[in-house]
Image (spheres, rainbow, N blue to C red):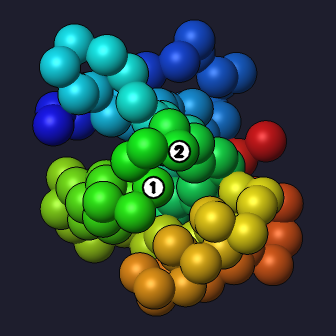
Amino acid sequence: MDFQDTHLPEAPSGKASEECLLLVHVRQIVGRVHYRMCERCARAVITGISIDERFRTTGLGTRALSHLRSRHPGVTWRNRAPGRTTRDLVRRMCIPTADDAAPCPHTA
């Protein structure tokens, strides 16, 4: 399993960028973690997680979120992604739900 970071098209000036972590298995994308990060505030919010059904019970989601935390040490993570599977995953990873729409004043 490989994790590939991708940067989505530029956000407006001064806004947190949209990022996507691709979960790749044998040259096939089997999942994605979408997130916004503000490096100035050291805050990030997960905006979406999708993992192919066949990989949902393999621990891939936990590995992907652990990968993000290790790549971005010192960043405070929050969750805003919908869905029960996502809620269960972020609860296990001790990532709180974002109580507002943006993780910081720089995010749109």
Q: Residue at x 22, y 13 (%)?
A: 27
| Residue 9 appears in the picture as rendered | yes
Instruction: Determine the residue positioned at 45% across, 85% down.
Output: 92
Q: Element at badge 1?
A: loop
Type of amino acid at the residue the image marks with label 2: Glu
Give the x, y percent position of residue 18.
57, 32
The answer to whether residue 49 is above or below residue 83 is above
What amino acid does circle 1 point to? Arg
Quadrant position of residue 70: bottom left
The residue beneath circle 1 is: 56
| Label 2: element kind | helix
Position of 17 relative to 53 (above/below):
above
Q: Nearer the viewer, residue 37 or 52?
A: 52
**Is the Cβ of the residue at disc 2 closer than 8 Å to that at disc 1?**
yes
Residue neighbourhood size for the residue with mark 2, other residues' Cα within 10 Å, grouped as few (<14), some (14–19), many (≥20)? few
Q: Quadrant of the N terminus?
A: top left
Q: Give the label on residue 85, or none.
A: none
Q: Nearer the viewer, residue 44 or 106?
A: 44
Whether residue 48 is situated above or below residue 62 in the rendered picture:
above
Query: Is 23 on the left or on the right of 39, as rendered?
Result: left
Instruction: Locate residue 28, reporting x and y percent.
Output: 31, 16
Please tell me which residue lies in front, 18 or 3. Answer: 3
5 relative to 26, above or below: below
Other-residue count near label 1 (Cα within 10 Å), few / some / many at <14 / 14–19 / ≥20: some
Disc 2: which residue: 53
Please state if 92 lies on the left or on the right of 72 as rendered. Answer: right
Name the residue at 23% across, 28% down.
25
Work out whether residue 106 can be spotted: no
Please name whichever residue, 57 or 11, is drawn nearer the observer in this view of the structure.
Answer: 57
- Mark pair 2, 1: CA separation: 5 Å
The residue under the point 53% across, 44% down is 53
Residue 50 located left or right of residue 28: right
